[in-house]
Image (tube, rainbow, N blue to C red):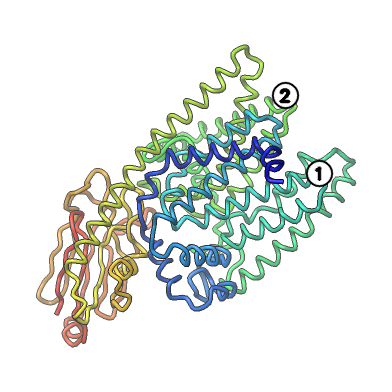
């Protein structure tokens, strides 16, 4: 039985093996990056949870309002935690395996809809080597996007198989796949439209009435799942169409258009070139309009000339699946936010692979031209990836240095209370601390009882000031303090105000558009600090090291 299975699926197994090999050969260094930022926060919550099934009735951090709803993510991450504990190596291995599996099902789906193995291979290779996947394969906390996209691609694959074969098993598998995707993260919320598109493009032609009846019948169960999901989500987090950053979707068109352009540009170039090209396009909007109509016209022309369905399907699918991401933003200064392009990149790579295959197909040297294009695209993408990988390496070094410095200063015999201020948010887009500051020091020092708080004002060290002192700190006898940027204007980010029992912190000269401030001031309560039962220390990062200021 095993031999017949291996013989039957030999080609697919070899394909999977090769894709796994490529992923681990090129992205092996990510295994040693360790944990960053939200990783620690999620690990800490998981280590303290009582019953993972409670997440079906709460948001993904155990709250009863706001946040993100993803109970299947919590179940999967809990299983990882039970298996791997705090050993980051295995979490990264798991992430790379899921990444390779996603590429494999991109291959299968592309092969089935295009009937062309070459297009399928190129789609999978482009998916693996897209440089805007760097964040997704480097940061454990992006598993929601990684896993939700994996199950979304499974849904595409199984539903297309159902359309072609009419076997109910594939319909059921597609249904379960999209349920898993939704209950991991809501990024696949536009899936009902994909059900319709797959049916319209790849089913047998019927009359208009017959097509409407067929699509409606097949869509009905998916719509029911969609409605039930929205109702459950509303009951838990308190909103239907909003997200954790905003309960309401803005109707302002321009920011959405800018985010769309950001996502498209991120497929080709990284920061700061993405921002530069975007600035040019919006400075000369007629260029943006021309590009849109030109690409649409060329897509129509090539599709008509070669009687191809794949181009229009992937083109329209890209526009549909990108919609949920248009209310969020890329960073103005780095590649932070590129995870929002991960799901939609599935359709981008299929479109690109099919487009250039058709474009070169009538030429005598079509294969040479096609693979020259693929080689050039992959080569440039890898160059960009390795450039960004260096940011993650440096971010890990900064984290490790901070952990060592904190461990040296930590005296567990004291009744410690740490106020973390101006901790590094990210390093040129590579994550660092932010939400996980307190949890990081608790977990890495095995000191779960440590008390403290994180002031939601952070620093933004970059490659240009790596290893340099980026701020000056001063404190007066009346417990008022200030931090001034040393190497550039924009060092601080976060919230404008933070109120603590021990005082008020504020971010000065704040630019709301880019969430950047130029300095920090604070007025601490000398009376409360002196009466506190804790040994209070202010801890801040100046770009070179952690600094500890004893307040009492």
Is 188 located above or below residue 246 in the figure? above
Residue at (47, 67) in percent of width and height: 82
Callout 2 secondary element: loop
The residue labelled by disc 1 is 165
**152 sits to left or right of 543:** right
Label 2 sits on residue: 306
Q: Nearer the viewer, mark 1 or mark 2?
A: 1
- Residue 62 percent across, percent down from the top left: 50, 74
Name the residue located 79 percent from the left edge and 58 percent from the top edge: 220
Residue 131 x, y percent position in the rendering:
45, 39
Task: Please determine whether, in this image, residue 161 is positioned above or below residue 309.
Answer: below
- Residue at 30 percent across and 64 percent down: it is 457
Residue 217 in the figure: left or right of residue 225? right
Residue 512, picture quadrant? bottom left
Q: Secondary structure at mark 1?
A: helix
Q: CA distance from mark 1 to mark 2?
A: 25 Å
Q: Nearer the viewer, residue 102 or 156?
A: 102
* Image coords of residue 375 (percent x, y): 49, 26
Mark 2 surroundings: few (<14), some (14-19) or many (≥20) residues within 10 A: few
Q: Residue at x 16, y 84 (%)?
A: 530
Position of residue 86 relative to residue 156, above or below, is below
Q: Quadrant of the C terminus?
A: bottom left
Task: Between residue 27 and residue 17, name the one nearer to us.
Answer: 17
């Amino acid at each position: 039985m095993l031999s017949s299975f291996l013989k039957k699926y030999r080609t697919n197994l070899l394909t999977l093996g090769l894709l796994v090999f490529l992923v681990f050969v090129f992205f092996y260094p990510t295994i040693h990056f360790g944990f960053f930022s939200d990783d620690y926060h999620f690990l800490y919550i998981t280590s303290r949870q009582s019953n993972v099934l409670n997440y079906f009735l709460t948001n993904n951090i155990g709250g009863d309002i706001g946040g993100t709803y993803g109970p299947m993510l919590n179940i999967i991450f809990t299983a990882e935690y039970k298996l791997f504990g705090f050993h980051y190596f295995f979490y990264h291995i798991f992430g790379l395996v899921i990444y390779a599996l996603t590429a494999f099902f991109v291959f299968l789906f592309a092969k089935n809809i295009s009937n062309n193995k070459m297009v399928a291979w190129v789609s999978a290779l482009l998916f693996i080597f897209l440089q805007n996947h760097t964040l997704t394969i480097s940061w454990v906390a992006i598993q929601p996007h990684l896993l939700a996209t994996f199950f979304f691609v499974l849904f595409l694959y199984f539903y297309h198989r159902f359309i072609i074969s009419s076997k109910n098993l594939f319909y059921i598998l597609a249904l379960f796949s999209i349920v898993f995707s939704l209950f991991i993260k809501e990024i696949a919320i536009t899936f009902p439209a994909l059900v319709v598109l797959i049916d319209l493009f790849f089913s047998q032609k019927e009359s208009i009435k017959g097509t409407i009846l067929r699509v409606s019948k097949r869509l009905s169960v998916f719509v029911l799942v969609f409605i039930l999901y929205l109702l459950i989500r509303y009951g838990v987090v308190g909103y239907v169409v909003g997200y954790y950053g905003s309960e309401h979707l803005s109707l302002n068109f321009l920011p959405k258009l800018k985010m769309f352009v950001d996502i498209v540009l991120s497929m080709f170039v990284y920061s700061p070139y993405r921002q530069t090209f975007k600035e040019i396009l919006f400075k000369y909007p007629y260029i943006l309009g021309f590009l849109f109509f030109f690409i649409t016209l060329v897509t129509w022309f090539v599709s008509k000339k070669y009687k191809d369905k794949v181009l229009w399907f992937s083109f329209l699918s890209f526009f549909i699946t990108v919609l949920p991401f248009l209310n969020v933003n890329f960073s103005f200064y780095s590649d932070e936010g590129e995870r929002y392009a991960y799901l939609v990149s599935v359709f981008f790579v299929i479109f690109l692979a099919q487009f250039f295959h058709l474009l070169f197909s009538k030429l005598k040297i079509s294969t040479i031209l096609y693979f020259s294009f693929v080689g050039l695209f992959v080569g440039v993408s890898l160059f960009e990836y390795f450039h960004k990988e260096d940011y993650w390496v440096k971010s890990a070094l900064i984290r490790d240095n901070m952990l060592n410095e904190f461990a040296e200063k930590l005296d567990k015999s004291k009744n410690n209370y740490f106020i973390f201020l101006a901790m590094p948010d990210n390093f040129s887009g590579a994550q660092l601390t932010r939400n996980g500051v307190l949890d990081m020091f608790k977990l890495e020092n095995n000191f779960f009882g440590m008390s403290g708080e994180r002031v939601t004002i952070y620093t933004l060290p970059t490659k240009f000031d790596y290893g340099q002192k980026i701020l000056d700190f001063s404190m007066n006898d009346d417990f008022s303090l200030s931090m001034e940027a040393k190497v550039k204007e924009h060092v601080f980010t976060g919230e404008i105000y933070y109120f603590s029992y021990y005082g008020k912190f504020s971010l000065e000269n704040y630019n709301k558009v880019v969430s950047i401030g130029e300095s920090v001031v604070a007025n601490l309560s000398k009376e409360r600090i002196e009466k506190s039962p804790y040994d209070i220390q202010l801890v801040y990062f100046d770009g070179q090291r952690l600094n500890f200021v004893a307040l009492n």
